[in-house]
């Protein structure tokens, strides 16, 4: 009996300790303050440039998107003459806008620019800034002794000219339906003093389009100075993919309603006829029973 009472007291003490520990953990979670994050990202895709806004709350390790928030974007300074656009975040807390042609003179004036965002149209200061250096990627291709070579070059603007950008990490590959397939042995490459990387295509018999074209891609992701750069080019290095023109004219499950397989039509119409036949049969039986009931009453 004494041991049983001792065990009960020990169990009670352990339970109290666990409850107090859980309470402290909950209190710590509640004490963590949420922080509003506004992130600007710059993208240059084949000289088409745009800005992407990410807006979310960060509480601990949890990120919660903030939707329906309007932002006013500016180039270099806040003002009507420097306004890029006004955008509203979607359910994922993202908004996207392109740099308009009206700002071309400002864009061409200098090699470095600052993108600014504000939640208030009359704001004098920005809520988030992003400074970038104008840059671009070029791709050159060659085939020698049956080997296909890819040369990707990263350049940046400086003193009204384009110079080589060295020590830049980029990816070189082939655009596929599920993503990007690396063209060589490495996943990433680093530019040399000439701003270039050379990659030998080691992928053979890649399926292309009807003409055998595949899309080569070179891209830089989240560079602290250049942002996100991407350049793609189509080359006839793939295997032509023959398209069966009669493929969708056959009676298959993925065809249109007018090309439905006969066995599926038979099943569907049999079910419809069976259901409606049963309904009509029950109605006929109900009418028949009613007539018999009327005759019995008359007698």
Image: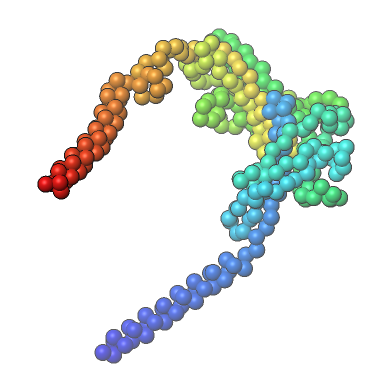
Q: Quadrant of residue 59?
A: bottom right
Q: Is residue 114 left or right of residue 215?
A: right
- Going by the picture, which residue comes out furthest to the bottom? 2
- Going by the picture, which residue comes out furthest to the left? 299
84 or 25: which is nearer to us? Answer: 84
State whether residue 138 is above or below residue 283.
above
Residue at image position (69%, 38%) is: 96
Count of numbered labels shown in the rendering: 0
141 or 101: which is nearer to us? Answer: 101
Percent from the top left, x then y, of residue 55?
A: 67, 48
Percent from the top left, x then y, of residue 189?
A: 62, 30
- Going by the picture, which residue comes out furthest to the top? 145
Residue at image position (34%, 84%) is: 8
Q: Is residue 237 visible?
A: no
Residue at image position (70%, 48%) is: 69
- The N terminus sits in image quarter: bottom left
Residue at image position (87%, 40%) is: 80
Percent from the top left, x then y, of residue 248?
A: 42, 17
Percent from the top left, x then y, of residue 263?
A: 27, 23
């Amino acid at each position: 009996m004494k041991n049983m009472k001792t065990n009960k007291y020990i169990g009670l003490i352990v339970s109290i300790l666990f409850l107090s520990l859980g309470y402290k953990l909950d209190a710590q979670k509640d004490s963590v303050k949420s922080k509003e994050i506004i992130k600007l990202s710059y993208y240059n895709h084949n000289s088409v440039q745009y800005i992407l806004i990410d807006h979310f709350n960060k509480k601990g390790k949890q990120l919660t998107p903030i939707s329906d928030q309007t932002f006013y974007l500016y180039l270099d300074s806040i003002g009507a003459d420097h306004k890029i656009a006004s955008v509203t975040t979607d359910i994922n807390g993202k908004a996207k806008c392109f740099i308009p042609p009206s700002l071309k003179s400002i864009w061409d004036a200098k090699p470095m620019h600052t993108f600014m965002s504000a939640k208030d149209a009359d704001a004098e200061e920005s809520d988030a800034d992003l400074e970038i250096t104008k840059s671009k990627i070029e791709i050159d291709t060659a085939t020698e002794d049956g080997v296909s070579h890819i040369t990707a070059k990263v350049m940046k603007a400086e003193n009204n000219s384009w110079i080589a950008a060295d020590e830049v990490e980029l990816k070189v590959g082939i655009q596929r339906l599920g993503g990007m397939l690396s063209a060589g042995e490495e996943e990433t490459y680093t530019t040399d003093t000439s701003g270039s990387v050379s990659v030998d295509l080691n992928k053979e018999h890649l399926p292309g389009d009807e003409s055998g074209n595949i899309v080569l891609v070179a891209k830089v992701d989240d560079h602290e100075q250049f942002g996100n750069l991407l350049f793609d080019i189509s080359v006839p290095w793939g295997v032509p993919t023959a398209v069966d023109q009669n493929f969708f004219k056959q009676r298959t499950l993925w065809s249109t309603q007018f090309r439905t397989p006969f066995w599926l039509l038979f099943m569907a119409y049999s079910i419809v006829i069976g259901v409606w036949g049963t309904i009509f049969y029950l109605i006929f039986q109900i009418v028949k029973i009613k007539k018999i009931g009327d005759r019995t009453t008359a007698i």
